[in-house]
Image (cartoon, rainbow, N blue to C red):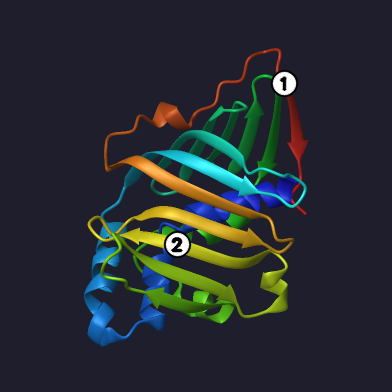
Amino acid sequence: MLIKRFFSLALCVSALALPAAAARRAADPNSLDEVIKKVQSAQKNTSSLEADFRQEKTLALLSQPEVSTGRFVYAKPNSVLWTYDAPKRVTMLIANGTLTTYYPDLKKAERIEVKQYQDRIFKYMGASGAIDELGAWFNFTFTNTTSKPYFVLDLDPKSKTIAKRVRHIKIFIDRKTYLTTQFEYTEGDGDKTRYEFTNIKVNAPIEPSRFTLALPANVRVEQMKLQ
């Protein structure tokens, strides 16, 4: 579960930059060149991002989707905060190479060192991205439907190894801001997770203290290993 949670978090973070890298490889330069340039420019000029999110999980074992809501905060180079408000309170923080997951209602927290993975994930946050690597992992389909307020990027894994983790990724890019406003992925077991981001604030000042998690003295902290 810990690996699955970190992988899910990593996908959402890297989604901010995937469109630029993927579009360049899959695009018809005669029709998508300007879109690519604007997506890359938006990424390059984004030093911080904050938004409300709605997460919907469709699981094989549940008859109804599981819906959660909260707040997402990102600041360059590698600080991320997910705060789940409902239905259960959970805080997930990546800072200084450590992922901390805090369950206030359970008075429990889990910590895991993720620096070796974090560096790989966050390099996609730059405008340059890692085009060759993404092209080695995924096949891309870029859709431009003029009646829609967004562009759509579909990613399908090329190898069975990647498909064991994720079967499909779909990213929605806003036509006006060129930022990711919706993101969904289907895991190897068929479970699907969808995020919708609203009230997005780009480059608004974010206090460094937002990425400091002060745990109460009565919280049990468990040190985990990512295997």
In the picture, residue 49 is in which quadrant? top left
Q: Residues within 10 Å of mark 1 (few under 14, many from 20)?
A: few
Q: Which mark is residue 143?
A: none
Q: Which mark is residue 171?
A: 2
- Frontmost of labels 2 and 1 is 2
Horizontal side of residue 196 vs 28, given as left or right = right
**Amino acid type of the residue that numbered disc 1 sits on in the rendered structure:** Leu
User: Contact, CB < 8 Å: mark 2 with mark 1?
Assistant: no
How many marks on residues?
Answer: 2
Residue drawn at x 27%, y 78% as measured from the top left: 32
Horizontal side of residue 82 vs 111, given as left or right = left
| Residue 37, horizontal then vertical, whole percent | 25, 71
- Inter-mark Cα distance, 2 to 1: 34 Å
| Residue 189, horizontal then vertical, whole percent | 74, 61
| Residue 53, horizontal then vertical, whole percent | 45, 40
Residue drawn at x 36%, y 41% as measured from the top left: 198
Q: Is residue 83 above or below residue 194?
A: above
Residue drawn at x 51%, y 74% as measured from the top left: 134
Q: Closer to the N terminus: mark 2 or mark 1?
A: 1
Task: Look at the image and tell me whether residue 97 can be seen.
Answer: no
Horizontal side of residue 219 vs 22, given as left or right = right
| Residue 75, horizontal then vertical, whole percent | 39, 43
Secondary structure found at label 1: loop
Q: Is residue 143 above or below residue 227?
A: below
Secondary structure found at label 2: strand
Q: Quadrant of the C terminus?
A: bottom right
Q: Which residue is mark 1?
A: 106
Task: Look at the image and tell me whether residue 120 can be seen.
Answer: yes
Horizontal side of residue 74 vs 67, given as left or right = left
Residue drawn at x 63%, y 44% as measured from the top left: 65
In the picture, residue 207 is in which quadrant? top left
**Amino acid type of the residue that numbered disc 2 sits on in the rendered structure:** Ile
